[in-house]
């Protein structure tokens, strides 16, 4: 390839459409502080997702930090997954929340509920933070049952799974809080941004205070908050991209279908035993060995194609010794997973070109 292909590229909407939303902010001289564009984006997302309690924030990491604050995780022991982007873990570290790392399912690559239940049942753990990795929903029924039986908070890092479905249902029917990222590289984005979705009305009220320094409607501040507000300029980008959402999803689904038609049947895809819709945000494939993955990665790079070993957890030097040991149990699975380039505008020729190189690495 003459021009490099990276693992992802932000969706760039037509500038003219973005300008129409920006003009509204300029005309009204409102740039932030829960302005009309933020309110419109919230309303549209609430309708689209059929949820009652939704708050836009400045990014997905702040969404995680606000969620851990609302559920008081600094005084609990949280269990989370070893296979995730650093922000899941760094947000817990930043909030001084103690946590332990569980095991992942060999097929869906998400936190395995069985061990979590054992740890919760004996009182070692009293909060859960699973991640719907690469958009694939966790076994939401199982985590819900644990949360209800032992009365422990359940927060999902849904950074990848805004439009994913579980057994035909919305993922937002499950859990206490979902934290979504609207970063430019995610499927649906607002340049930088995030969403909090709540089951309980009181958690939404708490979040609205916390994202605005802790200031309540009457002006009092009973708990220090932070500034996590989304600006009007970011909401304008969100509204613009939202208008193209159907096209974004359909085109990426076609690209994935093309990859699957070209790639060798020796590759293993992320899969679940339950019915699900995984939004087309990444294309991870599992190689038969770490060596074949390295061969493919290097060959791709030689041809100006940059795949990514996403979330390679051995990079997380900040972990405690105990968590580093616990994380090591996931390495035999995750060391064989590579994400191939997936972005809107990737052509069929490019997909075939990439697939051929990757297939040859198996030989
Ligand atoms: C992107 C991401 C985040 C962080 O979101 P930002 O909006 O970039 O702050 C958190 N968790 C996961 C799994 C992510 O991929």
Image (spheres, rainbow, N blue to C red):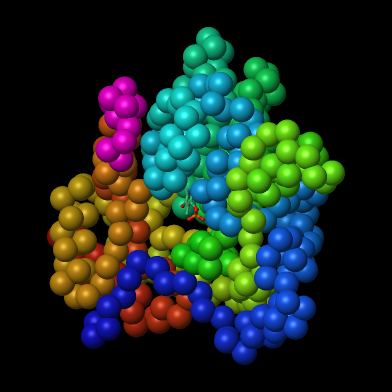
**Would you say 303 lies left or right of 140 here?**
left
Q: Position of residue 33 (x, y in %)?
A: 71, 61
Is residue 161 placed above or below 44 in the rendered structure? above
Asked whether 35 or 60 is in front, the reply is: 35
**Magenta residue span:** 316-325
Q: Is residue 318 magenta?
A: yes
Name the residue located 77 percent from the left edge and 68 percent from the top edge: 36
Is residue 118 placed above or below 241 in the rendered structure? above
Is residue 305 placed above or below 84 in the rendered structure? below
Asked whether 248 or 55 is in front, the reply is: 55
**Would you say 234 lies left or right of 86 here?**
right
Q: Position of residue 18 (x, y in %)?
A: 63, 82
Q: Position of residue 180 (x, y in %)?
A: 58, 52
Q: Quadrant of the C terminus?
A: bottom left
Is residue 40 placed above or below 115 in the rendered structure? below
**Would you say 146 lies left or right of 112 here?**
right
Q: Is residue 75 magenta?
A: no
Q: Does residue 196 appear anywhere in the picture?
A: no
Q: Does residue 50 appear anywhere in the picture?
A: yes
Name the residue located 22 percent from the left edge and 75 percent from the top edge: 304
């Amino acid at each position: 390839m003459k021009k490099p292909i990276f693992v992802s590229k932000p969706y760039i909407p037509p500038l003219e459409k973005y300008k129409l939303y920006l003009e509204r902010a300029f005309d009204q001289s409102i740039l932030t502080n829960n302005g009309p564009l933020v309110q419109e984006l919230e309303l549209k997302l609430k309708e689209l997702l059929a949820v009652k309690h939704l708050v836009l924030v400045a990014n997905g990491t702040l969404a995680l930090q606000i969620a851990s604050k609302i559920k008081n995780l600094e005084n609990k022991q949280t269990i989370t997954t070893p296979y995730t982007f650093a922000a899941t873990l760094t947000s817990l570290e930043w909030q001084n929340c103690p946590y332990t790392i569980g095991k992942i399912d060999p097929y869906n690559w998400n936190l395995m509920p069985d061990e979590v239940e054992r740890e919760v049942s004996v009182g070692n753990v009293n909060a859960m933070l699973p991640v719907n990795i690469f958009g694939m929903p966790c076994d939401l029924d199982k985590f819900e049952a644990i949360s209800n039986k032992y009365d422990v908070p359940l927060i999902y890092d849904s950074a990848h799974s805004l439009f994913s479905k579980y057994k035909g249902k919305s993922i937002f029917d499950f859990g206490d809080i979902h934290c979504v990222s609207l970063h430019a590289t995610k499927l649906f984005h607002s340049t930088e941004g995030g969403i909090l979705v709540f089951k309980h009305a009181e958690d939404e009220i708490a979040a609205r205070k916390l994202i605005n320094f802790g200031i309540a409607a009457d002006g009092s501040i009973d708990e220090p908050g932070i500034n996590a507000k989304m600006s009007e300029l970011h909401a304008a980008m969100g509204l613009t991209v939202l208008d193209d959402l159907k096209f974004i999803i359909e085109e990426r689904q076609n690209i994935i279908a093309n990859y699957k038609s070209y790639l060798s049947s020796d590759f293993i895809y992320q899969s679940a035993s339950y019915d699900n819709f995984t939004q087309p945000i990444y294309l991870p494939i599992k190689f038969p060995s770490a060596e074949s993955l390295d061969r493919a990665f290097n060959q791709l790079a030689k041809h100006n194609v940059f795949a990514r070993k996403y979330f390679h957890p051995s990079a997380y030097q900040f972990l405690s010794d105990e968590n580093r040991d616990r994380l090591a149990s996931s390495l035999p699975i995750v060391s064989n997973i590579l994400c191939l380039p997936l972005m809107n505008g990737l052509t069929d020729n490019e997909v075939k070109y990439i697939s051929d190189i990757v297939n040859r690495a198996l030989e």
